[in-house]
Image (cartoon, rainbow, N blue to C red):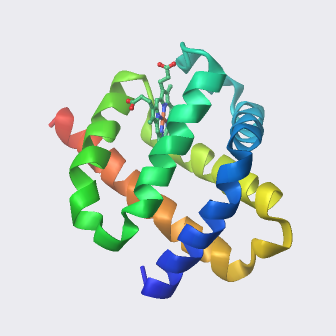
Amino acid sequence: MTPNQITLVQTTWAKVVPIAPTAAALFYGKLFELDPALRPLFKSSIEAQGEKLMMMIGTAVGGLNDLGALVPAVEGLGRRHSGYGVEDKDYDTVGTALLWTLEQGLGSAFTPEVKQAWTETYVTLSGVMKSAAAKAFA
Ligand code: HEM
């Protein structure tokens, strides 16, 4: 990712933070519309889960300048996700729901450059999660 893309992700995330509960609700609504079979994987309350998701995205977004430092935590997250029953293909569904949510929240600020920067962020993070999950079973 380029420094400009990192800045784009961080500045647009700062606009989502004040509406985080709404964004989380939109996100899960979209996710379960895209794949209702994912709903039973979530055992705790969706509100609590939404807070954790938003906090983790915030941590990841804040850490993009130093990805190396972020990797161990994201690997741990990926290993835990295989324990939650999450499969590789589910990362695509979550990515689609996340980008859609950002588009709803950001409106005209969700430019093609912003979309591309977020896509690269998500592909990077989900790639680390998936490979850590795969290694856990190797
Ligand atoms: C960048 C991608 C993702 C991030 C940052 C993320 C973040 C989180 C966080 C912070 C938790 C709290 C528990 C923990 O830390 O282990 C969690 C739990 C969970 N996540 Fe994710 N997640 C991601 C991708 C996914 C995907 C692709 C799915 C697939 C449906 C998913 C489903 C779940 C489930 C089922 C739980 C456990 C919920 C429960 O026990 O009620 N996550 N996630």
From where the camera sits, is residue 90 visible?
A: no
Q: Relative to residue 1, is residue 76 depicted above or below?
A: above
Choose between 119 and 37: the one closer to the eye.
Answer: 119
From where the camera sits, is residue 109 visible?
A: yes
Which of the 4 image quarters holds residue 42? Answer: top right
> Which residue lies most toward the left here?
138
Identify the residue at image location x=65%, y=75%: 114
Q: Relative to residue 85, is residue 124 depicted above or below?
A: below
Q: Position of residue 133 (x, y in %)?
A: 28, 39
Q: Is residue 109 left or right of residue 84?
A: right
Choose between 61 and 133: the one closer to the eye.
Answer: 61
Q: Is residue 59 left or right of residue 116?
A: left
- Quadrant of the drawing holding the N terminus: bottom left
Identify the residue at image location x=62%, y=62%: 14
Choose between 80 and 73: the one closer to the eye.
Answer: 73
Choose between 76 and 4: the one closer to the eye.
Answer: 4
Number of marks present in the image shown: 0
Identify the residue at image location x=65%, y=68%: 12
Which of the 4 image quarters holds residue 80? Answer: top left
Which of the 4 image quarters holds residue 41? Answer: top right
Q: Position of residue 102 (x, y in %)?
A: 71, 58
